[in-house]
Each structure stands twice: as structure tokens, then as C-alpha cells.
Image: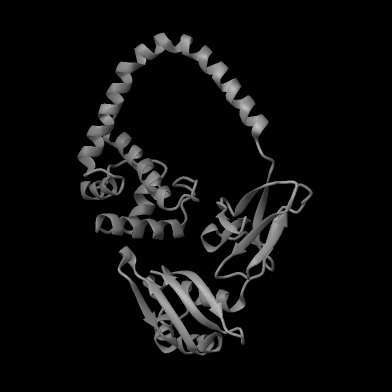
């Protein structure tokens, strides 16, 4: 194998390491979004204490093929992110694997015809028992009630309620999969940007969509944090309308370093300038007062 072949292997290892932190991402480098890139930059910085630029990711990682090997210092960073001491250890380890695979190939061929019969019987048995014991399920798509757009998994949580216990439902491709029972299964959908919704699902349920009603002020706040609005005065006036005078903001710091507290004025001053750190903030919780204004925000830095 050439060093470029090993680099292709490293790119796959980086994706696997990323999926450990963001298991809902099941794509490849071609489908790696701008938000995924920002997430990866933060993860690499947290794990290796070294930086990697968005441009470098587009040039070397998102490219379907690479004609030239990147600089070794960048290869070291990605190797460390993937669990190795550096590029040299990554190449050495994978070269040993390739050599071992070649040596074992001839021996495996001799056992192939004996094993294949056993595997065929085993697979048939597994499929039989899996099918006979499989529960009926239904997939439900999460959508914005007004725009009909699908909702990103990181912006919403889904739970079933059984015996007064909340059991989280994984969200993949904006869908949840619920086991169908004779009796109603209670599903709860929660999000800082959408109003809480509780629905009941059973074997007679035909609807395949869950339409969530957005919280207008929470959506406006999200737009303020993610956009590049330059008119600071207008932004400040609009923030004043949606934020309560008694606003409390808790920002959870990285690496379990604690939290920061902001009041309305402090938080507004932070938001009127659209910096990259503000854009990377993730809202975890929002509470509104009786007038509908936002009075509490919990954010992940």
C-alpha cells in the first residue's frame, strides 16, 4: 500500500472517531456538512490541543481522491484524534494488519468451504428467530409544522414513557422509530426551539409525521446567533423585545470547567456582534415567562 492509501484509511478513522461523538451522523465525507465541519474542528481542538482549518478539511478530507499527501504535522494531528500517537504509528499499525491479512488469506481459503456451510445454517436460524420475535415498529418523521422542513436531530429529543420512566428514542435522519403495541405508547418530543408535544402511538396509528410548532422567540434567537447580521442597533432593539428584563443565561464551559452567568444586558452585548464563538454555541434549554418572553437560557459552549 502507498502512503496515499494509508491516508484514505486515516480519513475513514477520522469519520469513525467523529461518529463516536455524533452517532446520528451516518454519512461520508461527501455528505459532511458545514455544521459537521465546525463540530469536527472543535473535537480535534479538544482532544489534541491543536487546530485544523475549515479550508484544510475541504481541500484534503472532503475531496473524493487525493493526488498529494498532506503535511506530516496535519497527519499527526488527525492520527492523534483517531487514537494513535501520530502518523508513523498509524501507518505501522495498519501495515502490520495488511501483512497479517495476506498471510492468513491462504489459510482462510482452505477453511472457506467448511465454514460457509455452517454459517449458512447459522444465518438461517438467526433470521428465523429474529423475524419470529421482531416487534412491529413505525417510523415517524419530525417536521416543522409551518415550513414542513425536517428537523435536525441535534435540535430535538424524543422519549417514550413507560411506568413513569423516560426512555430516549434515537433520532436518525430526522426520524424516530417506535415499537407498536396493542395499547397506546406515549411519545414525548422536546426541543428548545419547538413547543413540547405528547402523542400516543399504537398499531392503528396511520400518521407517519409529527409536526412540531416552533417557538417564535426561540427561533428568532437562533437566527441571531447563527446569522451574519451587521445592523447592530436593529439587532439590539429586536433582542430587547424577545428577552425578559430578568433574563438569566447559563453558558456551560468546555472540558467540564463549570459555567458562566450572563444577565440580559451582558448577553445582548455578546450577541450583537456575530463572532464565530457565538455561532458555535448550542442552545440546550429555553424557558419563557407568562408574557412569552425568554427568561432563561442554557447554552453549551
Coloration of the structure image: one colour
Q: Horizontal placement of 112 versus 158: left or right?
A: left
Comparing 196 with 104, the one in front is: 196
- The residue drawn where x is 45% and y is 83% is 248
- The residue drawn where x is 33% and y is 41% is 10
Q: Decide if residue 231 is in sight here.
A: no
Residue 131 placement (x, y as % from top left): 65, 30
Quarter holding the N terminus is: top left
Residue 194 placement (x, y as % from top left): 61, 69
Q: In this rendering, is residue 284 above or below 4?
A: below
- The residue drawn where x is 31% and y is 55% is 44
Q: Decide if residue 102 is in sight here.
A: yes
Q: In this rendering, is residue 101 above or below 177?
A: above
Residue 85 placement (x, y as % from top left): 21, 44
Quadrant of the rendered structure where residue 260 is? Answer: bottom left
Quarter holding the C terminus is: bottom left
Mark count: 0
Q: In this rendering, is residue 26 above or below 270?
A: above
Quadrant of the rendered structure where residue 151 is? Answer: bottom right
Comparing 168 with 206, the one in front is: 168
Q: Residue furthest front?
A: 163
- The residue drawn where x is 25% and y is 35% is 91
Q: In this rendering, is residue 1 above or below 118?
A: below
Amino acid at each position: 500500500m502507498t502512503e496515499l492509501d494509508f491516508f484514505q484509511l486515516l480519513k475513514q478513522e477520522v469519520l469513525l472517531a467523529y461518529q463516536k461523538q455524533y452517532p446520528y451522523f451516518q454519512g461520508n465525507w461527501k455528505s459532511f456538512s458545514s455544521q459537521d465541519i465546525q463540530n469536527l474542528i472543535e473535537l480535534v481542538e479538544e482532544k489534541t490541543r491543536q487546530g485544523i482549518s475549515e479550508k484544510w478539511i475541504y481541500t484534503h478530507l472532503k475531496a473524493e481522491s487525493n493526488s498529494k499527501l498532506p503535511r506530516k504535522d496535519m497527519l499527526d494531528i488527525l492520527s492523534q484524534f483517531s487514537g494513535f500517537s501520530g502518523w508513523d504509528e498509524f501507518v505501522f499499525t495498519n501495515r502490520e494488519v495488511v501483512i497479517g491479512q495476506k498471510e492468513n488469506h491462504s489459510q482462510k481459503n482452505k477453511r472457506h468451504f467448511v465454514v460457509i456451510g455452517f454459517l449458512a445454517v447459522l444465518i438461517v436460524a438467526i433470521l428465523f428467530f429474529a423475524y419470529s420475535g421482531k416487534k412491529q415498529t413505525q417510523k415517524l418523521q419530525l417536521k416543522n409544522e409551518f415550513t414542513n422542513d425536517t428537523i435536525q436531530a441535534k435540535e430535538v429529543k424524543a422519549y417514550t414513557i413507560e411506568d413513569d420512566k423516560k426512555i430516549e428514542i434515537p433520532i436518525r435522519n430526522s426520524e424516530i422509530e417506535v415499537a407498536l403495541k396493542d395499547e397506546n405508547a406515549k411519545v414525548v418530543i422536546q426541543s428548545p426551539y419547538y413547543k413540547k408535544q405528547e402523542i400516543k402511538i399504537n398499531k392503528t396509528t396511520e400518521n407517519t409525521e409529527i409536526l412540531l410548532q416552533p417557538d417564535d422567540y426561540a427561533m428568532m434567537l437562533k437566527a441571531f446567533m447563527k446569522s451574519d447580521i451587521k445592523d447592530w442597533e436593529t439587532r439590539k432593539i429586536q433582542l430587547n423585545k424577545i428577552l425578559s428584563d430578568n433574563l438569566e443565561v447559563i453558558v456551560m464551559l468546555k472540558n467540564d470547567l463549570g459555567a458562566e452567568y450572563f444577565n440580559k444586558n451582558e448577553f445582548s452585548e455578546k450577541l450583537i456582534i456575530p463572532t464565530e464563538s457565538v455561532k458555535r454555541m448550542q442552545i440546550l434549554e429555553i424557558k419563557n415567562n407568562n408574557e412569552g418572553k425568554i427568561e432563561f437560557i442554557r447554552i453549551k459552549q
